[in-house]
């Protein structure tokens, strides 16, 4: 099992290019199931979740060919199995995104329940309720969702909770349904908007993606397309915090700063200098980091996927900050590991109180989930001495060669197998 070894104290300097967004590429790959024609996806990040999705689609009969420069050619012409088996879904819960497209095009699907993960129960009730409103029958038994329909119909669906993949799943179900579907209280994440762009390029009729109300008018069939995945705003935010916590000076290129405006404004608030461009931004870390509270909310507010990384930064703050996590019920595991490095954190339910003002010291720590592993890397960059992070397979799910990118920026970091 790979580990990451870091010796802290080096400031990050230079330029980093951001990869494509995992959370935009995953729904885009599922959307390929909606047409028998060829789809080209550009700027796909070579992270583990993408390779798992490639394996899942392959098991259904989808042709998936990785071309050069992060481009995938996919073709769902000869679909055999309409099933996402447990063996694959248990390693990548986002497989639930094949449910909507399979029902829309083939009127049948058997998908393993994703189950929980380290950060929470991760229920899919809102996905299933929406599909049932559209005329699907969803039976849950033996750890699988058995879904079928005589034909999906447009419906009015109001989400009681904002759900990103719930919005994506139902948008993909609605594009081939008969009639019009309204998704109310929909997720506004850039990844949702990017998926809608792809579906429209395939011939779908979607309005309002990126807002809380999305209107989809069903069409008879969809064609192939060429679609570019947006840059990963969470990877960009992670590097921004890496520059802040090491007091470095970094140009973060190939990204859309507007997609992480809430993160960059929070960093300005704590004293980091940010200068925004069109396709990137510059981050200058300052010696003094002010402790500032933050609460996670759905986009466009501060994202839950940046909470762990921000906590690492707040351990270096000049006072006390309160971090409130409103999206997931158990997303503070990284706090326990940061405490092993000397951080002073008190967790009470959905709130973590971080007292700064004490340097971190390197230690052996363990990653528990994808963003927790990023948080431990950031802490290791700032800690005095050596940090060894175990279970970095979590990291590889969502970051492509992050240790190589950081080493090129001057960090003393390496992967040890
Ligand atoms: C997406 O997960 C992202 N994953 C997550 O990123 C991200 O943290 C999350 O959105 C929130 O922004 C992908 O896009 C692949 P949700 P998703 O449905 O869609 C509750 C990462 O680190 N809920 O928006 O699974 C749920 O329990 C990952 O890249 C229901 O109750 O999250 C949670 O409290 C981690 N019933 C809240 O909604 C449902 O049917 C938001 O979850 C669905 C969700």
Image (tube, rainbow, N blue to C red):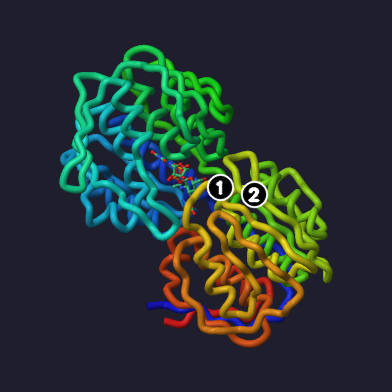
**Quadrant position of the C terminus in the picture:** bottom left
- Describe residue 57's horizontal placement relative to residue 247 as left or right: left
Label 2 – label 1 distance at C-alpha: 7 Å
Q: Quick one: quadrant of the N terminus? A: bottom left
Q: Residues within 10 Å of mark 2 (few under 14, many from 20)?
A: some
Q: Is mark 1 within 8 Å of ligand 1?
A: no
SS at mark 1?
A: loop
Is 40 in front, or is 408? 408
In contact (CB < 8 Å): disc 2 and disc 1: yes
According to the picture, the residue beneath numbered tag 1 turns out to be 326
Residue named by callout 2: 295
Q: Is mark 2 within 8 Å of ligand 1?
A: no
- At horizontal 42% and vertical 22% (from top left) the residue drawn is 157
Mark 2 lies on a secondary structure that is: strand
Residue 173 on image: x %, y %: 34, 27
Q: Of residues 197 and 123, which is closer to you in this image?
A: 123
| Count of all numbered marks drawn on residues in the image | 2
């Amino acid at each position: 099992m790979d580990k990451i070894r870091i010796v802290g104290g080096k400031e990050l300097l230079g330029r980093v290019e951001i990869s494509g967004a995992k959370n935009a590429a995953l729904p885009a790959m599922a959307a390929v199931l909606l047409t028998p024609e060829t789809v080209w996806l550009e700027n796909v990040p070579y992270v583990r979740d993408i390779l798992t999705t490639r394996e899942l689609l392959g098991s259904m009969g989808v042709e998936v060919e990785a071309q050069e420069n992060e481009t995938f050619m996919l073709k769902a012409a000869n679909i055999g199995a309409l099933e996402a088996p447990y063996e694959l879904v248990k390693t990548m819960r986002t497989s639930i995104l094949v449910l909507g497209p399979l029902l829309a095009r083939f009127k049948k699907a058997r998908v393993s329940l994703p189950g929980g993960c380290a950060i929470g129960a991760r229920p899919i009730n809102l996905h299933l309720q929406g599909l049932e409103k559209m005329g699907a029958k969803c039976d849950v038994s033996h750890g699988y969702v058995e879904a079928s329909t005589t034909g999906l119909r447009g419906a009015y669906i109001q989400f009681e909770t904002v759900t990103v993949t719930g919005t994506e799943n139902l948008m993909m179900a609605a594009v081939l349904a008969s009639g019009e579907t309204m998704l109310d209280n929909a997720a506004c994440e850039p990844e949702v908007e990017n998926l809608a762009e792809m579906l429209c390029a395939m011939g779908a009729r979607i309005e309002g993606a990126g807002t809380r109300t999305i209107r989809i008018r069903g069409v008879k069939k969809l064609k192939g397309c060429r679609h570019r995945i947006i840059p990963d705003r969470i990877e960009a935010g992670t590097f921004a915090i890496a520059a802040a916590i090491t007091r470095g000076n970094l140009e973060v290129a190939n990204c859309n700063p507007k997609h992480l405006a809430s993160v960059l404004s929070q960093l300005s608030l704590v004293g980091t200098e940010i200068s925004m461009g069109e396709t990137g931004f510059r981050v200058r870390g300052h010696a003094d980091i002010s402790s500032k509270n933050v609460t996670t909310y759905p986009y466009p507010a501060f994202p839950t996927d940046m909470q762990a990384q921000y906590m690492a930064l707040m351990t270096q703050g000049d006072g006390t900050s309160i971090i409130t996590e409103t999206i997931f019920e158990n997303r503070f595991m990284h706090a326990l590991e940061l405490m092993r490095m000397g951080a002073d954190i008190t967790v009470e339910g959905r709130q973590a109180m971080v007292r700064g003002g004490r340097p971190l010291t390197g230690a052996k720590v363990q990653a528990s989930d994808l963003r927790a592993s990023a948080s431990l890397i950031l802490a290791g960059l700032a800690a005095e001495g050596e940090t060894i992070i175990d279970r970095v397979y979590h990291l590889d799910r969502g970051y492509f060669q992050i240790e190589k990118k950081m080493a090129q920026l001057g960090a003393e970091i390496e992967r040890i197998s």
